[in-house]
Image (cartoon, helix red, strand yellow):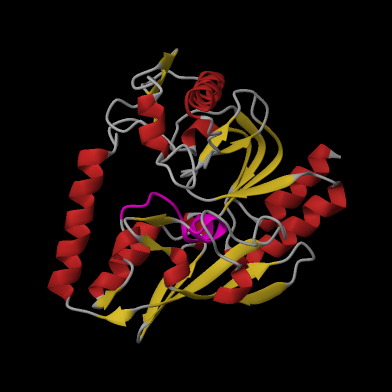
Amino acid sequence: MKESFLEGLQKITDRCFVQEHMSGHTTFRVGGPAEYYVCPRREQLSEIISLCKAYEVPWLVIGNGSNLLVGDKGISGLVIEMGKEAAKVSVEGNLVKAQAGALLSSVARSAANCGLTGMEFASGIPGTVGGALVMNAGAYGGEIKQIVKRAIVLTPEGEERELTREDLDLGYRHSCIPENQYIVLEAEFELKPGDFTQIEEEMARLRRQRSEKQPLEYPSAGSTFKRPEGYFAGKLIQDAGLRGCRVGDAQVSEKHCGFVINRGEATAEEISQLIRKVQEQVEEYAGVRLETEVRFLGDF
């Protein structure tokens, strides 16, 4: 059966891999092998999902791997990367249309080059359009909710559906996409005309701020924890005495305590243990249970 499933995948796309190590596809730079791994074009996706259903093979979708922690034992089934093969960006008037695999930085750059403002906040977020919609990504006072006009998704039944901003039910690190098992195919952002020089200056300012305050020199998944209501996660972690705390090569960043980093040789298990330790110690110190922004995938 497995040989037949693989043959089916190979007929659909030549970007098909077996036992593909996820450490090369996540910004944490950890993770064991995916049983199957594909990088399809948008038009191939529906056929791939149908094949998974026919062979009862579990599947999941990733983008740039910037918000994931994949277990050291890897992932059973199929991992679908919506990346470079589905990353077209176009601009028409005040509207920027981008496929799910387009990096936010590339979309923000395209907008800036056309003198469109409103997306500067996203220029340094290390994720794709699809991932940004799934979690309503945001930074420095901006969020996807403010600029998205509509999205095209693939339903579990293999049908394309258009969702408006209201349909997406966007909130803090939330959308309706995961609960409905939708796959983002593309999004359209509505921006405003602006001054190119001012847009460039704002993007440069945010790059400097990000570099000064975040541990960009180490692999990480960005902000590890969601912001608890009425608190800042990094401040709680620091006040609980966890600045620089380590489990193996996993460490709470000394530069920004809201980040768990990989100092070079960390395993997924070490990162997971450190995250749990932070949650437990912060809860003991402040009575607040930190929720992770990071998604845990696969077997640990």
- Tell me the residue at 68%/27% (across/down): 299
Where does residue 142 sit, x and y in percent of width and height?
36, 62
Q: Is residue 174 above or below residue 95?
A: above
Q: Is residue 11 magenta?
A: no
Where does residue 157 sit, x and y in percent of width and height?
80, 65
Q: Quadrant of residue 260?
A: top left
- Tell me the residue at 65%/62% (across/down): 176
Left or right for 300, reference 87: right
Residue found at the far top of this picture: 248
- Tell me the residue at 36%/26% (across/down): 239
Left or right for 154, reference 140: right
Left or right for 109, reference 45: left
Q: Is residue 90 above or below residue 214?
A: below
Q: Quadrant of residue 36?
A: top right
Look at the image and tell me whether residue 245 can be seen.
yes
Of residues 213 and 116, the one nearer the viewer is 213
Q: Is residue 100 above or below residue 231?
A: below
Residue found at the far bottom of this picture: 93
All told, the count of numbered labels is 0
Of residues 13 and 156, the one nearer the viewer is 156
Left or right for 190, reference 37: left
Q: Is residue 132 magenta?
A: yes
Q: Which residues are magenta?
A: 124-136
Q: Is residue 294 above or below residue 197?
A: above
Look at the image and tell me whether residue 249 can be seen.
no
